[in-house]
Amino acid sequence: ATAAGASRLRIVNGCDREPLWVAHEAGQGIGPDPQNVKIEPLGSYDFQTPGGLSGTRYWPKMRCDERGNVCGIGESGGPQEVCGTKAGCAPPVDTKFEATFGHEGEEDWVDISLVDGYTLPFRFEMLGNCSAGFGSHRDGGSVVDCSHLSFEDCPGDEDLGDGRTGVSLQVVNPDTNKIV
């Protein structure tokens, strides 16, 4: 952990053609940064991570209106989020970064969550001397590279066996009836 108010989280837009919007929450609110932070192509944003900021979640959104709402990707709701007017929010299948930031001298906890699915590929890089897991110490950082995730490689359905029919695993935008 670092001094209060310092940033321990930088999000970089690796797309060179479109802006990325980042929605986030901390506990029951949005945390110290404005909601729907716009990051221009190949740009970055350093989020505030004061000591004791807990229960945070950050997720990417794209193809949004000028305020970062009503997005084509990632509009799954949350504090101060405005979803589409016809069908409401999309299912929460977003690529998620979750963290609790300790006070100076304490630990930070991070989790990259793809448990419900993912919307965009990413690369997570941890810098400095960090504990990785239950006490194992790593010097110099650690990388989780999911930058090659591809929708084309996703299964379209799941065979549940026992004579049941396949179940679709694809998320369909109810406004456009297209796969998200």
Image (tube, rainbow, N blue to C red):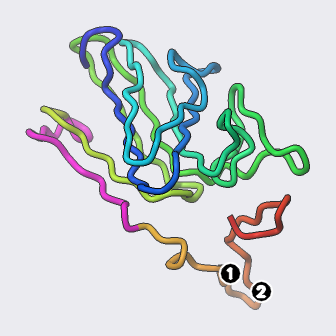
Q: Categorize mark 2 by other alpha carbons within 10 Å: few (<14), some (14-19), many (20+).
A: few
Is residue 120 found left or right of 75 in the rendered image?
A: left
Which residue is at 64% across, 51% downward?
A: 63
Q: Secondary structure at mark 2?
A: loop
Q: Amino acid at mark 1?
A: Leu
Residue 137: give its label.
none
Q: Amino acid at mark 2?
A: Thr
Q: Are marks 1 and 2 in contact (CB under 8 Å)?
A: yes
* Image position, residue 31 (x, y; %): 54, 18
Depth order, front residue of 85/114: 85
Q: Which residues are magenta?
A: 131-148
Q: Magenta segment: does it hold 114?
A: no
Q: Earlier in the sequence, mark 1 or mark 2?
A: 1
Can you say whether 20 is above or below 163 in the image? Answer: above
* Image position, residue 35 (x, y; %): 60, 26
Residue under circle 2?
A: 165
Which residue is at 24% across, 40% downward?
A: 126
Image quadrant where residue 141 sits? top left
Q: Categorize mark 1 by other alpha carbons within 10 Å: few (<14), some (14-19), many (20+).
A: few
